[in-house]
Image (cartoon, rainbow, N blue to C red):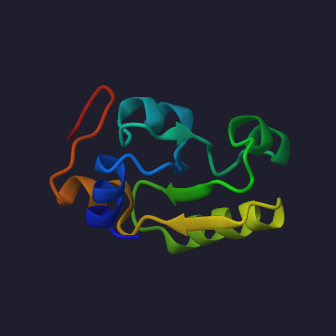
Amino acid sequence: MNPQNLKSALDAGKLFMLVDLQDAHSYQHRHIPGAVNVPSTASAEECARILPDKDAQIVVYGEYDELGKGGEAINGLKKLGYVSVDRLEGGLMGWMEAGFAVEGGNES
């Protein structure tokens, strides 16, 4: 999913889980509004607690367009039984480069 499609989906109120894969400090620094923090190191139990609906549409992103980290997260979530998982192209930096707002302590 590209940043423009994600922004349109958010503006339209589509229901899905937006998952930030950054560590907690980076998430607090800046993240996409509405995102929940599930660090890429999260255990299966943490994922189940934070993302209880395995049928929900999930979009994951890291700071950059990290195919490795994003791909691993997608594969990991699918192995845990999540059925609809996608990756935000460009990650957080792509979102910001598209001119969309972030939350947190610093937008730069």
Q: Is residue 55 left or right of residue 21?
A: right
Q: Quadrant of residue 80?
A: bottom right
The quadrant of the picture occupied by the N terminus is bottom left
The residue lying at 38 percent from left, 40 percent from top is 31
Where is 57 relative to 21, above or below? below
Where is 95 relative to 106, above or below? below
Q: Quadrant of residue 33?
A: top left
Residue at the farthest left position = 99
Name the foreground residue: 103 vs 82.
82
Where is 6 relative to 20, above or below? below
Q: Position of residue 7 (x, y in %)?
A: 29, 55
Q: Is residue 70 left or right of residue 7?
A: right
Q: Is residue 40 left or right of residue 52?
A: left
The residue lying at 58 percent from left, 56 percent from top is 58
Name the foreground residue: 44 vs 40.
44
Where is 104 relative to 85, above or below? above
Name the foreground residue: 33 vs 65.
33
The residue lying at 28 percent from left, 58 percent from top is 8
Count of numbered marks = 0
Q: Position of residue 47 (x, y in %)?
A: 74, 44
